Image (tube, grey):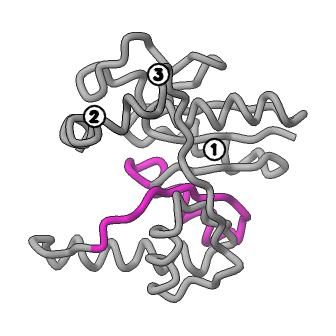
């Protein structure tokens, strides 16, 4: 079995998930990133985009070869991490229309819509409705995300709690003592 993990950027928590997939499963993992590591945003000391596997970079603009690959490899599994670019948005729509099963992994969505244009509100509503009626499992980061989707009337059987795990190199008490600094730095 091949599992395609499709996301915008590599992150430490996704790398923990990739490592676990590789250790606990006979599945082959195929990584897809819209962009190679974003040094400006995260300032990681190493490039984590290819830490466990060499990733394919599909780009931020519409990539028809990437879309064709995803549609033509029906026997493979797909995990879409969010819907931040035109390729992942189109895949959500096409998988919905074709009634293809897939997985969607999301952190806690921002429920606030204040300051958002009407167009953005409508697009957000449509995206969630499309996801709700798709053949998808929605992996949610924590109970807050599950509660959010339940308030949007997603079926409970569709939601799976999959918290973020991050490897740390210091004692957890060190991180606890720096809570405010870390929160401010990473928003």
Q: Which residue is mark 3?
A: 170
Name the residue located 38 percent from the left edge and 48 percent from the top edge: 85
Q: Which mark is residue 178?
A: 2
Name which of mark 1 and mark 3 comes first in the sequence: 1
Q: Which residues are magenta?
A: 83-111
Name the residue located 44 percent from the left edge and 76 percent from the top edge: 148
* Mark 3 burial class by Cα count in 10 Å: few <14, some 14-19, many 20+: few
Q: Give how far apart the Cα atoms at labels 1 and 3 are.
A: 44 Å
Vertical placement of residue 55 versus 116, above or below: above
Tell whether 137 sits left or right of 77: left
Vertical placement of residue 42 versus 45, above or below: below
Mark 2 secondary-structure assignment: loop
Name which of mark 2 and mark 3 comes first in the sequence: 3
Mark 1 secondary-structure assignment: helix
Q: Which mark is residue 68?
A: 1
Name which of mark 2 and mark 1 comes first in the sequence: 1
Vertical placement of residue 122 versus 101, above or below: below
Residue 122 or residue 28, whichever sits in front: 28
Name the residue located 57 percent from the left edge and 51 percent from the top edge: 80
Residue 36: x and y, percent? 42, 22
Q: Kindly indicate the quadrant of the structure image that contains residue 103.
A: bottom right
In the rendered structure, are the residues bearing label 1 and label 3 in contact, judged by CB atoms less than 8 Å apart?
no
Residue 176: x and y, percent? 36, 39
């Amino acid at each position: 079995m091949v599992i395609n993990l499709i996301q915008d950027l590599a992150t430490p928590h996704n790398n923990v998930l990739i490592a676990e997939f590789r250790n606990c499963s006979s599945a082959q993992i195929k990584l897809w990133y819209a962009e190679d590591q974003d040094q400006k945003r995260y300032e990681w000391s190493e490039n984590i985009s290819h830490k466990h596997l060499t990733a394919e970079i599909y780009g931020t603009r519409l990539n028809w070869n990437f879309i064709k690959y995803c549609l033509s490899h029906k026997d493979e599994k797909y995990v879409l991490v969010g819907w931040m670019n035109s390729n992942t948005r189109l895949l959500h729509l096409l998988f919905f229309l074709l009634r293809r099963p897939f997985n969607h992994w999301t952190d806690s969505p921002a429920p606030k819509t204040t300051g958002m244009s009407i167009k953005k509100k409508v697009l957000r509503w449509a995206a969630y409705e499309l996801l709700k009626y798709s053949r998808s499992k929605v992996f949610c980061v924590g109970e807050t995300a599950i509660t959010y989707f339940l308030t949007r009337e997603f079926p409970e059987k569709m939601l799976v709690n999959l918290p973020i795990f991050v490897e740390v190199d210091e004692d957890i008490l060190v991180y606890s003592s720096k809570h405010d600094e870390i929160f401010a730095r990473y928003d």
